[in-house]
Image: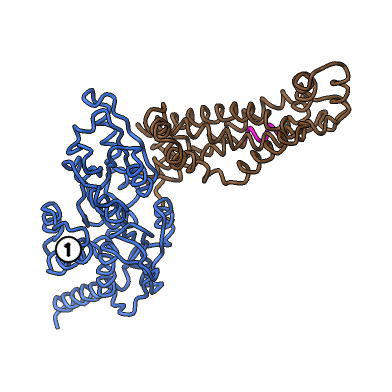
Amino acid sequence: MHYHWHWDVLLQQPYSTWLLDGFLVTIALSLIGWAIAMVLGTLVGAMRTASSPIMRAAGALYVRVFRNIPLLLQMFLWFFVLPEILPDAAGHFLKRDLPYPEFTTAALCLGCYTASRVAEIVRAGILSAGTGQRIAALASGMSTIQAYRYVLLPLAFRLTVPPLVSEFLSVFKNSSVALTIGVFELTNQANQIENYTFQGFEAYTAATVLYAAISFVCLRGTRLLSRHASVGGMISAGGAL
Amino acid sequence: MTPYRIALLALLASISLGWSSVWAEDLTGTLKKIKDSGEITIGNRESSVPFSYLDEHGIPVGYSVDLCKTVVDEVKKTLNLPNLKVRYMTVAPAARIPLLSNGTIDLECSTTDRTLARMRQVAFSVPTFVIGGRILTKVGSGIADWSDLHRKVIGVAQGTHTEQLVNALVATPAYAGTRVLTLKDHAQGLLALETGRVDGYVTDDIVLYGLRSTSRMKNQLAVTGKPLSVDTYAIVLRRDDPDFEIVVDHALSELYQSPEIEALYHKWFDRFDIPMSAENRCMYQIGALGP
């Protein structure tokens, strides 16, 4: 092996700034994507357990479409294809007037993709809460929305903390796919450093360490959360993460 | 025979023995590896037209590949290995350095820029082609030079010297309001230009000519602007391997002095209808080192 190690590139300008910028973009992209995914995913997950067959079908359609198309392809479709099939004015807006077009598109795409996975988790949570809770809530005079809002969803979330945490960690890793549409997140900055200096091993090692750090911090934080959220008498009570 | 004469003969004998064994025994680095294994491996690209790409039969061809073939001939001569086996390996840009470092490929023949930062990791041959960063734009867009890109959206190819220069240019007050979109590869750059996402796509001029020739709207596209920079492509070798470097430069140097280089240029670049640039002509003259 004739590789010349130069760890100092990681501390040189502009490479150290690139890494830091990439790290921050990865975090911002992932958190925004996760926020979209939680809101949309909860909605779709609830729809999948609704009594109306139309709502159930719409929810199922959403999950099938967004979960079964590779994320890489979705990024490309959102960025290059969507503006072309929309009316000219809307397409022009997406291409020219949208602030930070690559970043915004990537966050939206990541959010919609992750929402399909969150929806399945939420649906599982609602189903495992059992029909008894739903019937009891409705019998005590709650509307369907109130039953979801105050009984079913809170229970569902508390029951599904472990899979939600693992999905949350996946968002950070999936965010790297945004590099295909030109977002300078962590992996892309590492690519860029490789390209300019040919010191790829150092750059990718730095990116790996930063991803691991994100995972570590998230796991620590969510372990506390899951202990707090566990429901007595259910399988996930005290469940290990 | 006087002792003096004996000493002189011994000296001459040792010099001549030493001389004849220079190549045979003191081979180092890549030359030794090639001699020992009886084969040389060339790293080529899949679609860097017309420098290094796979033809319809999947065979690596192109201007850079032809230059590497000249190098292989020189290696055969130097090592006295007429039956040297030549292998090709198609490598992605991201894999070229690890594969060169671990000895999977011995030469990378494509469109790699010579830069100082990269020279800490690899060595380069003498330059093989001169390129300048220019603009591909739609005919009638009114963009004839860099100043016309003010308040427009510029697409740049990621990882090129031109990308850095464009970013620096746009950061100046004269270009306030100009946006830069960085594109992953040239196919995306062309798509962004065709769909009107960017007003101009900027990268190495020779690449722009190639892109234009493959575009479905080639008659509506033009390459404009004065070169923003002058860069050179070169063959990539492992660093700290001076003997092999001499063989490579020797081969290129001889080629640059022969009429063959003119023919080679026509063979690969006539398709774009651009004559040999003054810069390239000058580069061949400079690259043609004296014996």
Question: What x and y, as percent, mark residue B165?
Answer: 26, 36
Up the image or down, B207 lies above or below A41; here it is: below
Horizontal side of residue B10 vs A234, given as left or right: left
Q: What chain letter is assigned to the residue under label 1?
A: B
Image coordinates of residue B206 in percent, x first then y, are 24, 52
Q: Quadrant of residue A141?
A: top right
Prevalent SS, magenta region: helix
Apparent side of residue A57 relative to residue B278 in the rendered image (left or right): right
Judging by colour alone, the chain drawn in brown in this rendered image is A
A119 is higher (above) or lower (below) than A73: above
- Mark yes or no: residue A197 visible: no
Q: How is the image coloured?
A: by chain
Is A31 situated left or right of B93 in this image? right
Count of residue discs: 1
* Disc 1: which residue: B253
Per the rendered image, the range of residues in magenta is: A164-169
The residue that appears at 67% across and 27% down in the rendered structure is A220
Residue A136 drawn in magenta: no
Question: Identity of the amino acid at label 1?
Answer: Ser
| Front residue of this view, candidates A101 and B9 | A101
Whether residue A116 sits left or right of residue A15 in the image: it is right
Residue found 77% across the figure and 18% down from its top:
A146
